[in-house]
Image (cartoon, rainbow, N blue to C red):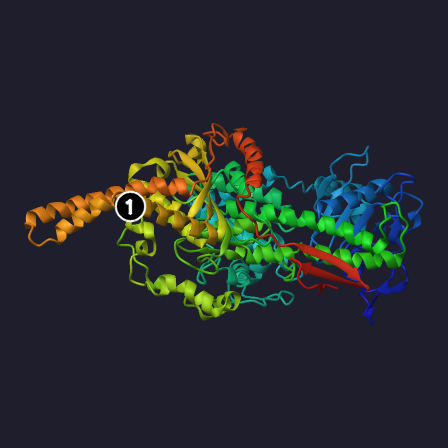
Amino acid sequence: MEIQIKDNKIFAPLKDRWLVLTPEEKVRQEYIKRLVNNYGYELEQMQQEVTVAEGNKRGTGKARADIVIWASPEKVEKEAPVIVVECKAESINISEDDYKQGSHYARYTKAPFFVTTNLKQTKVFKVNLEGFPKDLGDEILDIPSLEELNDKKKLQEIINRTKSFTRDEFSRLLFRCHNIIRNNDKLSPEAAFDEISKILFMKIRYERNPNEDNVFSLKQFKKEEAHYEKNIRPVNVKRNGPKDDIPYMDYWFELTKDEFEKDDLFDPNDSIKIKQTSFEAIVKELQKYNLSTTSDDVKGIAFEKFLGKTFRGELGQFFTPRTIVDFMVELLDPQEGEIICDPCCGSGGFLIKAFEYVREKIEMDIKKQKEQITKSVLGEDYSPESETTDDERAKLNRYIEALERELDTSYEGGRLHHLANDCIFGTDANPRMAHTSKMNMIMHGDGHCGVHHRDGLLNINGIFENRFDVILTNPPFGSRVEKSLEITAADCITDPKKIAEYENKYGKEVYQQAMSQVNDNVGKSLLGLYDVGKLSGLTEVLFVERCLRLLKPGGRLGIVLPEGVLNTTNLQSVREQFEGMAKIILITSLPQDVFAASGATVKPSILFFKKFTQEEKEQYLNAQKEARIQIESQYAPQLADLQEFINNKNNSRTDIKNKKAELKNLKAQIEQEIKPVVKQLFDYQIPVAQIEKAGITTTGAECENELNDLLKEYVPYRTENNLWKSETLHYAYKVNNNIMYKQINGGSWEKVI
């Protein structure tokens, strides 16, 4: 079977007529073609757009299943079908509601299998026809072919090949792969993880290009390697990528490096460092699964679990417990359109949670917009039971598809693409962690392209002063930046393509000004970039100033710090520096053992800051000025007398020297007396919370989480006191004269479709 398209119409063989070529109709016909060509089904045993209704039950109305398949042409409409297929346009990300819809159709028609597909994502379920369970059924690897459908033994094998890709199963899968490398290749846990990452990226690359000949399967691998060893290229295998004369294992990796070149994931000279037998064993483990169609929540959290155990040793400090991450993100409440950063991103926990948090807000808004558009097209009185014509449904589907395209990270004009590509930034000085963070973010749904291997104290792509609305971070504790550590030429960005890309994105003048932080200070001490560098070389202290500088005026920061930063006498001057840059909006003292599972022993706190707005900065400076006038006026006679004595050349040198020392001490005393007056004049409330249980024990097990209670108290307090104003993007959609428009923040209406 071939697809026939002409004059913006597509031929539907199951209806024997030409239909309007919509994105969803194209997917429907492509899947029918797949059913015929790949699975051996006949057109005569299928029907398109079959009405499924349940009489007077609410919410079903004249719902139609896209494709329904019977066991044979003779059984069409006489017996229950065997497969129900629900199709979505290729640009639409399939949601849980779409799977539920397919499951509902299958159960009503008593079909044992249902498929939901947009061609890029395809999931198959074995339906539980007993009763009406809440779950969708067991996910399996594929539907049966016509031959398998009529062979009870083969059919049972397919049913048994469940794809219940649970977190634990995926985690076990990763551990099996990890152990294969450790046992076969004797690599360290971290080095073994690097090799697994490469293979996972190969797998992801293949799933992005499912129609190419370089199939990610053990069978294909063995076939290729057999030909390679004989120095013979099979005619039907196309190597359209680099280096035709290398083993297939390495060839796959070369293609993967090309695919992710912009992301700086791999060194150009990097290679696979495991034995072929190890690679074969891992491919065999992975080939059954599709990482692209597995839910982000399942594979993401499982991947984190795997990371936590793999890096528990020397890299344990790179992981912030999930309960802490969740609390910090929810408290700072990032909004759509706000720019978020973690300059010490480790495994990416804060960035992932922030991405998911904002994505959920976008998804909820799109759901609301769908309901509004549906009523605007079909009338305010529309309900799921209402009768609709084919033309009305086709028209509505165009608008719904346009809305759902907003949730596709690959659609450049979409809201999720903007979130993933323009709003999430991070750096980590450890190359393995920067790499891991990117993989972790891909597993959770993306947002990885703003993450870089870089010292977090230095500027890079988009990470520069006064740019961020929200910063969430857990900097390394206890380490020091020595005065001898200099900025070097290697810290400069020299790639012309990258420079051009960044200048185009941020503006040439803005980008060059940002990079002057590095380019103009080569050979100078890194400490010299920061005011607190004169007072302390502690990494956590430097990162507080770094984060406050990165924030826009009014931006907010959540940072995990050792409690000593708050109460150690020798850091008093450092604290005063920060008090002159931002308001402290909450201090949360955590249990000492909350980071024990990561190997840390220091008692931690979480500090939440809001950087001064311009108005607050002026208020603070005015408070300083007024306090100085007030205190200095009290000591004016003494100051004048001392200065007069010092200026009198008739006095002895010894007496003048003593008076200078006295004047110096008096000025120091004045400075100390000014500080409490400034705090009185620039007074605001600083809430402090003491948490005894933070949801995690010393062994990493779950326990009671008082942070949830603190959130419930703090959110109303924050709202009542108007602690900050979020820069939220507001979207509106409307349909006028069969044209759909989008508006952002009350601006002009732009045509969507």
List the single residue furthest toward the bottom: 7
Residue 242 x %, y %: 53, 67
Please, is residue 270 above or below residue 496 in the view?
above
Residue that badge 1 annotates = 633
Can residue 171 be seen in the rendering of this structure?
no
Please, is residue 477 above or below residue 339 in the view?
above
Question: In the image shown, does 176 or 660 lie closer to the viewer?
Answer: 660
Under mark 1, the amino acid is Ser
Question: In the image shown, does 92 or 126 lie closer to the viewer?
Answer: 92
* Residue 433 relative to residue 176: left or right: left
Residue 436 x %, y %: 49, 49
Question: In the image shown, does 586 or 740 lie closer to the viewer?
Answer: 586
**Residue at point 17%, 47% (across, down):** 641
Please, is residue 508 above or below residue 323 in the view?
below
- The secondary structure type at the circle numbered 1 is helix
* Residue 334 relative to residue 681: left or right: right
Residue 544 x %, y %: 40, 47
How packed mark 1 is, by other alpha carbons closer than 10 Å (few <14, some 14-19, many 20 or more), is few
Name the image quarter holding the C terminus: bottom right
Quarter occupied by residue 584: top left
Question: In the image shown, does 284 or 529 lie closer to the viewer?
Answer: 529
Residue 268 x %, y %: 45, 63
* Residue 72 relative to residue 214: left or right: right
**Residue at point 5%, 49% (across, down):** 652
